[in-house]
Image (cartoon, rainbow, N blue to C red):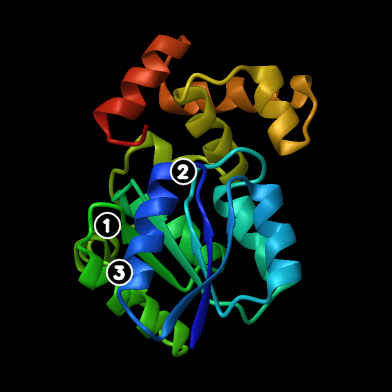
């Protein structure tokens, strides 16, 4: 039996995942979490065999949340289920400690395959994402500006692109508004944008928001 913890802030997504898990007798729902803090608490209390995790949730999320879960449960397999097929996001997740990466438009059969593979101790990356990871530009080649962002800058970039304000982002990431503003200025300079509208447009054009 594989006991699975679902971490996703959308109720309709969690419901769909429960229905997929119910298709297989060896899969069992261990718990659900709708924000990063609940994920950490559930990892501590319900002892799942696998964490099925969305990259963007309230509270700690993405790379930061993966690292925190790794501190709590170093051996817990983490299968990221994200709306983003962008190789940079997948690469950051895997580098942080994710065991697998899958996009939300995958078929249920693919999800079950990924769960089985990751739970067995192996890794799984969606083939299309793996191909982009494999053939992404080398360090000496021209790369998209967002590839140059640090993990913290990237976290804040995604939240800004989702319309969140500096104060809200600071509360979620436990940073001061001044620190968030400093990161915001740096990342906007790296992206070559002058305002939030341009930042949002940048993210949408690259399917990052």
- Cα separation, mark 1 vs mark 2, equals 34 Å
Q: Which residue shows up at 37% across the image and 70% down it? A: 21
The x, y position of residue 118, in whole percent, is: 42, 80
Residue at 70 percent across and 34 percent down: it is: 172
Distance in Å between CA atoms under marks 3 and 2:
18 Å
Q: Mark 1 Cα within 10 Å, few/some/many (few <14, many 20+)?
A: few
Location of mark 1 (residue): 136
| Residue indicated by mark 3 | 111
Mark 2 element type:
helix
Check disc 3: other Cα within 10 Å, few if <14, some if 14-19, many if 20+. Answer: many
Q: Nearer the viewer, mark 3 or mark 2?
A: 2
Q: In this view of the protein, can residue 140 be seen by the observer?
A: no
Tag 1, which secondary structure?
loop
Q: Position of residue 95 (x, y in %)?
A: 51, 65
Residue 208 falls in image quadrant:
top left
Q: Which is nearer the eye, 75 or 40? A: 40
> Where, quadrant-wise, is the C terminus in this rendering?
top left
| Whether residue 14 can be seen here | yes
Q: Earlier in the sequence, mark 3 or mark 1?
A: 3
Which image quadrant for residue 60? top right
In this view, 120 is above or below 64:
below
- Give 36 or 101, whichever is nearer the viewer: 36
Q: Position of residue 121 (x, y in %)?
A: 47, 88
């Amino acid at each position: 039996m594989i006991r699975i913890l679902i971490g996703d802030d959308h109720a309709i997504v969690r419901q769909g995942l429960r229905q997929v898990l119910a298709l297989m007798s060896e899969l069992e729902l261990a718990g659900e979490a709708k924000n990063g803090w609940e994920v950490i608490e559930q990892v501590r209390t319900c002892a799942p065999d696998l964490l099925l995790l969305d990259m963007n949730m309230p509270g700690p999320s993405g790379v930061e949340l993966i690292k925190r879960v790794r501190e709590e449960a170093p051996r817990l397999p983490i299968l990221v289920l994200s709306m983003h097929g962008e190789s940079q996001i997948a690469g950051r997740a895997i580098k942080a400690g994710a065991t697998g990466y899958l996009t939300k438009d995958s078929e249920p059969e693919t999800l079950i395959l990924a769960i089985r593979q990751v739970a067995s101790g192996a890794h799984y990356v969606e083939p299309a994402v793996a191909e982009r990871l494999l053939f992404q530009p080398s360090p000496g080649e021209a790369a998209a500006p967002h590839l140059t962002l640090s993990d913290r800058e990237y976290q804040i970039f995604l939240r800004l692109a989702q319309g969140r304000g500096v104060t809200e982002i600071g509360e979620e990431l436990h940073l001061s508004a001044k620190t968030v503003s400093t990161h915001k200025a740096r990342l906007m300079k790296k992206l070559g944008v002058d305002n939030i509208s341009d930042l949002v447009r940048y993210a949408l054009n690259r399917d990052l928001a």
